[in-house]
Amino acid sequence: MNRRIFLKSSAMAMFGVGSTPVWLSRALYAADAPSPRKKILVAIFQRGAVDGLNVVVPHGEQRYYDLRPSIAIPRPDSTADSAIDLDGFFGLHPSLKPLKPIYDSGQLAIVHAVGSPDPTRSHFDAQDYMESGTPGRKATSDGWLNRALPQEEQKSPVRAVSFSADLPRTLRGHNDAVAIANLNDFQVRDARGASSFESMYASTMDKVLNGTGRETFEAVKIMQAMQKQGYTPANNARYPGGRLGQSMKQIAQLIKSDIGLEVAFTDVGGWDTHVNEVGAKPSQGQLANLLNDFGQTLAAFYQDLGDRMADVTVVTMSEFGRTARENGNRGTDHGHANVMLVVGGDIKGGKVYCDWPGMAQEQLYENRDLNLTTDFRDVLGELVTRHLGNRQIASVFPGFADPKFRGLVAS
């Protein structure tokens, strides 16, 4: 066994492992002893390769409309099916209307023509490279988000949490991390058995097993205490009922409980739009439905956290983009460059950060895809360095020798 906490709710559904530790009760319930706030980074992975060109629309580029005669999002004209203008050249998909006020407030930044420099169009390989933070290198054993955790002597057992059935690639590594399918299901059904295991781990002379066991049961007790509290989102925020919405709601609960969370991860699938990407109207169909849920979730999280967003940054990513030209099935195929969203209180938003490569045939990557002008590690590296405060960028992204930060984070 290694020291990484790896819990699956289906295997350990924990309940009744003992009373809440005194230090935790004090941190959770005593108004006169709040835990110090930490900077927190939340990463959302859009699995399946989202079509960035239809998410943040280059409506000022005529070639976009030439290449996508039946699936392009119409230029902004204030109707429900047209793009929502951002800066005269780019616009949001109409299903992302809830994000426009955040953009206008200066706390949503968009990075376009961004992605991995590795040319693979394999979902599996591209996701692996992005989660490891080492494009083209399959031998990397850990993930960038695990390596991004600052080194500390006093560590919370729930400083790194993923809302997923298994621990994702990005959180595997030396630092402890917890995988939770659902916060409310994080219990042990067999109280007597759990107590025996806790005693066994506590008494072992093996330092690794002792540490792993202690951290595991501390994490369980923290979650139990939170379950007893319940949770009501603030500021009339309403999360969608889907998996992404509920995961982000529970991440908000962890943040506001002040239990030492530093990084969180969740993902959402369904973005592989080869067929019928849009419906009869651009505001309908597979992509619109996904973006409707996605936009409402991010907006609810932002509204729920309120002034806590001063310490929180959310970043979205996907393994690669889609082809510039629509295919014969009114969809798009695997492409190259894409779009990333960054939301946070210390983000210099209200801007699309982009060295636009153009969409003329000779400007496209391999004559078919939007070209890459920003490496995804430039975006993540700046968040790790200037938001989380981890200056060891060479350790977080090994082999990435010359990062070029875009100025996303206010100094």
Image: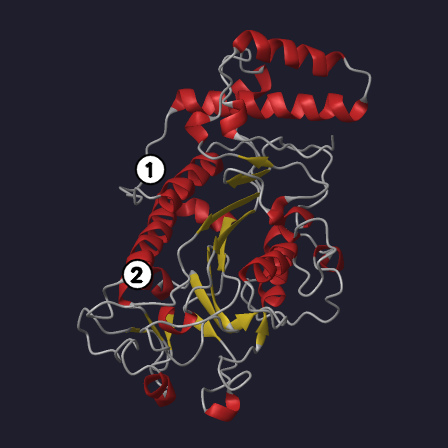
Residue 208 in percent (x, y) is at: 77, 27
- Determine if residue 32 is in view: no
What residue does disc 2 label? 286
- Determine if residue 388 is in view: yes
Of all residues, the one furthest to the right in this rendering is: 205
The answer to whether 256 is drawn above or below residue 137 in the figure is above
> Which residue: 38% across, 88% down?
63
Q: What kind of residue is marked 2?
A: Gln
What residue does disc 1 label? 233
Tell which of 316 and 319 is nearer to you: 319
The answer to whether 233 is drawn above or below residue 89 in the figure is above
Quadrant including the C terminus: bottom right
- As helix, strand or loop, the secondary structure at mark 2 comes to helix
Residue 56 in percent (x, y) is at: 38, 71
- As helix, strand or loop, the secondary structure at mark 1 comes to loop
Q: CA distance from mark 1 to mark 2?
A: 28 Å
Disc number lying in front (1 or 2): 2
